């Protein structure tokens, strides 16, 4: 979801530095947001397993809001339907940007992350269905392991993959754009049971008015804020998950700037809303969604409950093999090209990060299951995400040493002073052996 300017500006040298600073700013925001997300999740787990667990449950289930308009909801529901709508609005902005002026606008560049994301959704779903087939609840729970948490994954990448080429970050961001889109479609398809057509028409009217205002270059928030709130409320009353209103509004926002315009509306909105989304909305959701009692019964059931096993295998095996496997096949068949300076070992490490399912996986777990089953499923998501982050970190650190050694070797070849180098690159050694044969 890298920030890129319009294609007709990319050839000009004076926009290269702004483009890079936009990507750097985004990575920095998501890295900080990922760190806050981890802290919020840790606080939730500790609180839910402390002597004050009842206070945590009472806060999570505390209902606020006007009953007259059916909005007397628990804080947990407000976090799911309200705060995550902001998160999905930002995701919609990023998706629109990528499709119009970003990496996904170039079909050749877009093909590999698109293929990787599709493989990373289909294989986890098939594994989850195969493992949990016949178990009550699997008809919706199969969707739990299909989503990657981009904030969490980027946080791990920033902490342990600083020596990995920047193309790794661009690949992961582009992959996440498609992954988010597929997850949104799945949520809309699975968790819409009945639709109130009048309210749906109201939501469509609000979205149409928003799109028309964008077309007319209207900029006042006095129009857009009420339209966004009405669209969200109409979607909520229509029986469709209200977060989809955020996605739709993001996709309808203009991403190309006009001549004389300092920045496009999408860029301006991201600058203002993204810190709030990454620093508040997602962490608060994680605070209420991650509070799983990790007693002996829950821990034992994670390895005996078939839905929990479906989640663990779907995330850890399905995501990793799905993302890397289809990427490897696509590159070998010549359908797509690897990102610059990345080897297959680098891509495998990034695929492991794709197994970090957190925000959307926890949301789907709460939508698909209830009671003890939901708690076990969320515990499986937390355990698997932690495992994937540890394995991915180890692989990234190793690959970082390889790239560092390669850079030192290149510096030595040009006569520069060579600092202490790490281990040689396996791919390079293999190539040298072939040259001598």
Image (cartoon, helix red, strand yellow):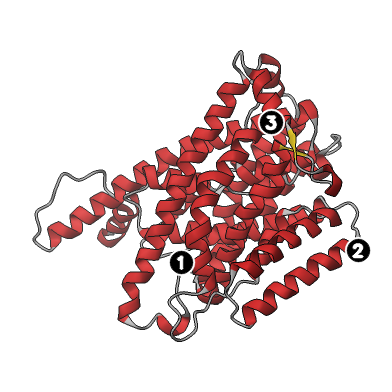
Which mark is in front, 1 or 3? 3
* Mark found first going from the N terminus, 1 or 3: 1
Q: Residues within 10 Å of mark 2 (few under 14, many from 20)?
A: few
Q: Residues within 10 Å of mark 3 (few under 14, many from 20)?
A: some
Secondary structure at badge 1 equals loop
Q: Position of residue 423 (x, y in %)?
A: 26, 44
> Which of the 4 quarters of the picture holds residue 414?
bottom left
Residue drawn at (79%, 36%), measured in percent from left and top? 369
Q: Which of the pair 347/280 is nearer the observer?
A: 280
Residue at the spot of label 1: 3
Question: Considering only vertical position in the picture, is 51 above or below 313?
Answer: above
Question: Considering only vertical position in the picture, is 232 above or below 264?
Answer: above
Q: Which disc is residue 197 wearing? A: 2
Secondary structure at badge 2 equals helix
> Which of the 4 quarters of the picture holds residue 46?
top right
Q: Position of residue 169 (x, y in %)?
A: 43, 57
For this view, does 417 lie left or right of residue 279? left
Question: Considering only vertical position in the picture, is 324 above or below 2?
Answer: above
> Would you say residue 115 is visible in this rendering?
yes
> Would you say residue 302 is visible in this rendering?
no
Secondary structure at badge 3 equals helix
């Amino acid at each position: 979801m890298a920030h890129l300017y319009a294609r007709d500006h990319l050839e000009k040298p004076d926009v290269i530095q702004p483009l890079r600073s936009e990507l750097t700013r985004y990575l920095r925001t998501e890295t900080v947001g990922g760190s806050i997300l981890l802290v919020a999740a840790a606080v939730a787990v500790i609180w839910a397993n402390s002597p004050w667990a009842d206070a945590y449950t009472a806060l999570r289930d505390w209902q606020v809001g006007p009953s007259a308009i059916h909005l007397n909801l628990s804080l947990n529901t407000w976090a799911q339907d309200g705060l995550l709508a902001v998160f999905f609005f930002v995701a919609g902005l990023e998706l629109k940007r990528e499709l119009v002026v970003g990496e996904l606008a170039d079909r050749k560049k877009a093909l590999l992350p698109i293929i990787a994301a599709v493989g990373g959704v289909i294989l986890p779903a098939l594994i989850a269905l195969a493992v949990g087939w016949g178990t009550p609840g699997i008809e919706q729970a199969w969707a739990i392991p299909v989503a990657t948490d981009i904030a969490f994954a980027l946080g791990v990448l920033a902490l342990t993959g600083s020596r990995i080429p920047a193309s790794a970050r661009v690949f992961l961001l582009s992959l996440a754009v498609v992954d988010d889109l597929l997850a949104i479609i799945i949520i809309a398809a699975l968790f819409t049971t009945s639709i109130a057509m009048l309210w749906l028409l109201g939501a469509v009217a609000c979205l149409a008015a928003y799109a028309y205002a964008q077309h007319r270059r209207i900029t006042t928030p006095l129009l857009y804020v009420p339209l966004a709130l009405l669209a969200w409320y109409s979607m909520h009353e229509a029986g469709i998950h209200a977060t989809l209103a955020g996605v739709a509004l993001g996709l309808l926002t203009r991403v190309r700037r006009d001549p004389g315009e300092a920045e496009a509306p999408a860029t301006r909105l991201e600058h203002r809303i993204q810190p709030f989304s990454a620093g508040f909305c997602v962490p608060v959701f994680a605070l209420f969604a991650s509070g799983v009692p990790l007693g002996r019964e829950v821990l034992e059931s994670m390895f005996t409950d078939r839905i929990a096993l479906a989640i663990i295998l779907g995330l850890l095996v399905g995501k990793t093999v799905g993302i890397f496997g289809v990427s490897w096949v696509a590159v070998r068949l010549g359908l797509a090209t690897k990102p610059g300076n990345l080897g297959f070992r680098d891509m495998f490490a990034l695929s492991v990060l794709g197994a970090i399912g957190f925000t959307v996986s926890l949301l789907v777990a709460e939508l698909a299951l209830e009671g003890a089953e939901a708690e076990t499923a969320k515990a499986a998501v937390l355990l698997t995400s932690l495992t994937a982050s540890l394995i991915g970190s180890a692989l990234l650190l190793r690959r970082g040493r390889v790239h560092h050694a390669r850079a030192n070797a290149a510096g030595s070849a040009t006569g520069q002073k060579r600092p202490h180098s790490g281990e040689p690159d396996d791919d390079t050694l293999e190539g040298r052996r072939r040259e001598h044969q």
